[in-house]
């Protein structure tokens, strides 16, 4: 393989490796999600009529 092929190979593999590492970093350092309320407190949605 000539120098141009090696350059493209190293750049493409390096970019994909960097992108993978960046994505893993973003997932692992994401803030914890807050509590999600699906309805306002005190509203009876009648979804558990026993």
Image (cartoon, rainbow, N blue to C red):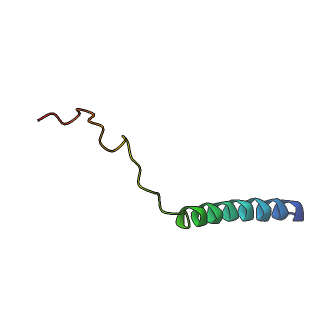
Q: How many marks?
A: 0
Instruction: Establish if 38 lies above or below 24.
Output: above
Q: Is residue 8 left or right of residue 35?
A: right
Instruction: Establish if 20 lies above or below 43.
Output: below
Location of residue 27 in the rendering, given as x and y in whole percent from the top left corner? 55, 61
Observer able to see residue 29: yes
Q: Residue at x 15, y 33 (%)?
A: 49
Quarter of the image with the C terminus in it = top left
Q: Is residue 48 left or right of residue 35?
A: left
Q: Residue at x 57, y 64 (%)?
A: 24
Q: Residue furthest right?
A: 3
Q: Is residue 3 left or right of residue 32?
A: right
17 and 43: which is toward the camera? 43
Q: Residue at x 84, y 64 (%)?
A: 7
Q: Quadrant location of residue 43?
A: top left
18 and 6: which is toward the camera? 18
Q: Residue at x 67, y 64 (%)?
A: 17
Observer able to see residue 1: no
Q: Quadrant location of residue 16?
A: bottom right
Quarter of the image with the N terminus in it = bottom right
Q: Residue furthest left?
A: 50
């Amino acid at each position: 393989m000539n120098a141009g092929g090696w350059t493209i190979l190293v750049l493409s593999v390096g970019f994909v490796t960097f992108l993978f590492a960046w994505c893993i970093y973003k997932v692992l350092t994401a803030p914890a999600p807050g509590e999600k309320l699906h309805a306002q407190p005190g509203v009876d949605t009648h979804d558990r009529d026993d």
